[in-house]
Image (tube, rainbow, N blue to C red):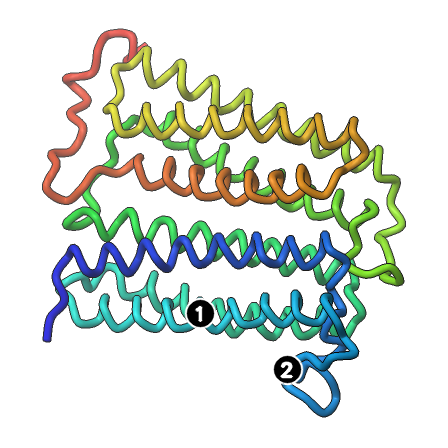
């Protein structure tokens, strides 16, 4: 039995959504102080895989997040099956990597619990989640087209897109350090990084300004060179998400990190990663589309 492109695309979309959802549920665990709701791993307690009555609400919240991992695993396996039973051989490596990321996350999550929410391990946990969100996003976007074609923009602009991707990675990485230095540790007794929260937050803000600046520069250059609409839209939408995320970030900082805003900020981080992945994907056209003809570029592009 061979699955149709529509089925593959829908399953890949479910995989992308599930990868984003588990980041949000993980954030809810931290923000409710439920990081050690299940004090051990892989069991919830030393004698039980499920939370006991003594663990109360925190145990239920942490256990619920672990259950989301099983849902994600089922969806990821379904994605691999759908891809391997379709004509899309080019998607196989993406689907396999997306699946293999889940046990890697589970092990890292276990280490997080066993180290009593070490902030650096927690940071790595979030960074890996972000990588998996990017992979799942590209997998879904590629599944909607017959294959990968030629670059649609000139090399300097493609390099600028690469710079935006690197800046996004830096923003996310430093953002995890900001969180690891702040009050939301996931448990009342968890250690912090020991870094000055204000200084780390300033570095994070500086990187955000860099990211926004690079995105604005790209958008201006794309419009000046009459770049394809898919690339322009990807850059424009990323900029909108960045600006919204920046507003949330500043508001949460000056209102002393209220739980709801921090959770919205985590959602914004997931969206920035996804929209950055979309921008990287948009640089190359579908296999059925003709490559960019340099001779057809407007005069301004050749300067």
The mark found on residue 71 in the picture is 1
Q: Which residue is mark 2?
A: 50
- In the image, residue 50 sits, relative to residue 202, either above or below, namely below
* Residue 160 image offset from top left, x and y in percent: 44, 28
- Name the residue: 68% across, 79% down: 51
* Residue 114 image offset from top left, x and y in percent: 76, 75
User: Rounded to the nearest whole Å, what is the CA distance between mark 2 and mark 1?
Assistant: 16 Å
| Residue 97 in which image quadrant | bottom left
- Name the residue: 64% across, 69% down: 109
| Residue 227 in which image quadrant | top left
* Residue 23 image offset from top left, x and y in percent: 56, 55
- Name the residue: 71% across, 71% down: 59
- Name the residue: 34% across, 61% down: 94
Q: Does 1 sit left or right of 160 as displayed?
A: left
Of residue 138 and residue 7, the one placed in the foreground of this image is 7
Which image quadrant: the N terminus?
bottom left
Of residue 224 and residue 95, the one placed in the foreground of this image is 95
């Amino acid at each position: 039995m061979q699955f149709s492109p529509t089925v593959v695309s829908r399953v890949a979309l479910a995989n992308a959504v599930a990868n984003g959802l588990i980041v949000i549920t993980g954030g809810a665990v931290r923000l409710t102080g439920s990081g050690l709701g299940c004090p051990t791993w892989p069991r919830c307690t030393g004698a039980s895989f499920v939370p006991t009555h003594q663990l109360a609400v925190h145990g239920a919240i942490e256990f619920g997040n672990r259950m989301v991992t099983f849902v994600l695993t089922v969806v990821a396996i379904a994605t691999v099956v759908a891809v391997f039973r379709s004509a899309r051989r080019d998607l196989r490596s993406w689907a396999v990597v997306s699946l293999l990321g889940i046990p890697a996350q589970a092990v890292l999550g276990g280490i997080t619990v066993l180290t009593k929410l070490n902030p650096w391990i927690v940071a790595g946990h979030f960074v890996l989640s972000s990588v998996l969100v990017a992979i799942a996003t590209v997998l879904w976007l590629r599944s909607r087209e017959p294959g990968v074609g030629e670059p649609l923009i000139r090399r300097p602009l493609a390099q600028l897109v690469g710079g935006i991707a690197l800046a996004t990675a830096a923003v996310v990485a430093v953002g995890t350090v900001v969180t690891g230095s702040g009050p939301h540790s996931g448990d009342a007794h968890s250690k912090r990084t020991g870094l000055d929260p204000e200084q780390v937050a300033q570095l994070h803000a500086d990187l955000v300004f860099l990211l926004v600046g690079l995105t604005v520069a790209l958008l201006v250059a794309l419009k000046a060179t009459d770049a394809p609409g898919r690339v322009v839209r990807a850059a424009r939408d990323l900029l909108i998400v960045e600006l919204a995320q920046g507003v949330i970030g500043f508001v949460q900082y000056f209102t002393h990190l209220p739980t709801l805003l921090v959770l919205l900020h985590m959602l914004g981080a997931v969206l920035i990663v996804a929209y950055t992945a979309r921008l990287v994907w948009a640089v190359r056209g579908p296999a059925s589309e003709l490559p960019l003809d340099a001779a057809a570029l407007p005069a301004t592009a050749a300067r």
